[in-house]
Amino acid sequence: MLAHRIAWSLPCLLVLVAVGRRGRELVRVLGSSRTRWLLLASTLLITVNWLCFLWAVSHDRVLDSSLGYYINPLVSVFLGFVFLGERLRRPQWAAVALAAGGVLLLTARHGLPWISLALAFSFGTYGLVRKVADAPPMLGLLVEIALLTPVTVGYLSWLRVRGDGAFAAGDLTTTLLLAAAGPVTVVPLLFFADGIRKLTLATVGFLQYMTPTGHFILAVAVFGEPFDATHLAAFACIWTALGLYSYDLKRRLAPRSGR
C-alpha cells in the first residue's frame, strides 16, 4: 500500500510541475545543499509516519493512531518552542503537561504506546523540517516522492515477478483504489506543506486534531477496539489539554479579529 502511494504520487506531481512551468524553480531548490539534506530528512520522517499509520490500521490499532494524532498538535507546540523560539504561555505548558500525563497513564496500565508516540513525533518533526526547508510545498513534496520512487518501484516489480502483486491482478476495485492512492496522498500533503510555511506550528497543531476525532469514532464505534477506563482517563487528559490550548489560542487571536 505504501509503495503504491509513492509510485502513483510521482506522475501526479510531475504533471502539476510541468503545467505550472516550475522546472527552473525545482533546479534552484536542488541547488542548495542545506535544502537537499532537509528534504532527505523530511522524506525519512514521512516514510516512518506512513508506515506506522498503515501498520496501525492493518493490525486493529486505530485507537492508537487516534491517540498519536491527538498528541501531535502538542508535540508541534513543544517543537516550535524548542527549535523555533515560539513562546509558550502558561495554558500551553499546562496542556503539554496534561497530554504527557495521559500518555503516562496508558504506559502504566498497557505499556508504552509506541505507535502513538511514533506517529506524533514523526509527523510533528516532519512539519518542523518542512517549515524551515527553503522549498515550495509542491516542489518539496516532489523531491520527497522522487527519492522514494526507485525503492518502491523496485519492490512492486519484485512482487509482480513473484505473482504477489495486487495491481491489475483481476480485482478492478483494488486496482482503482491503489491508483487513487496518488492524488489522495498528494492533495492533503500539498495543503499541509503550504499551511506549515504560512502559520505557526502551534496553529497548525491546533487544526490537526480534527483527524484523530474521526479515527477515535471509527475505532470505538465502528471497529469495536478495546476501550477501558484507563483509555478513557488518558483520552480525557488529552481532550482537556486540547480544550485548554484551544481556549488560550482563541483568546489570543480575538483582539486581532476585533472581537
Image (cartoon, helix red, strand yellow):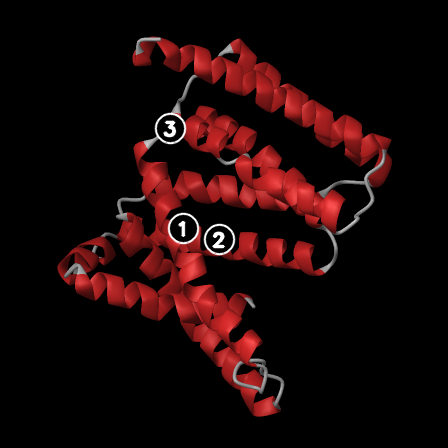
> Which image quarter: residue 197?
top left
**Mark 3–mark 2 CB contact (< 8 Å):** no
Residue shown at 49%/51% (left/top)?
45
Dot 1: element: helix
Q: Label 2: how many residues lie within 10 Å, few (<14), some (14-19) or many (20+)?
A: some
Q: Residue at x 35, y 8 (%)?
A: 259
Residue 105, located in which quarter of the rendered image?
A: top right
Q: CA distance from mark 3 to mark 2?
A: 20 Å
Q: What residue type is disc 2 on?
A: Ile
Specify the amino acid type for callout 3: Thr
| Front label number (3 vs 1) | 1
Q: Is residue 3 above or below residue 55?
A: below
Please give the residue where the numbered disc 3 appears in the rendered image.
200
Mark 1–mark 2 contact, CB under 8 Å? yes
Looking at the image, residue 244 sits to the left or right of residue 31; the answer is right
* Disc on the earlier residue, 3 or 2: 2
Q: Secondary structure at mark 2?
A: helix
Sooner in the amino-acid sequence: mark 3 or mark 1 = 1
Which label belongs to residue 46? 2
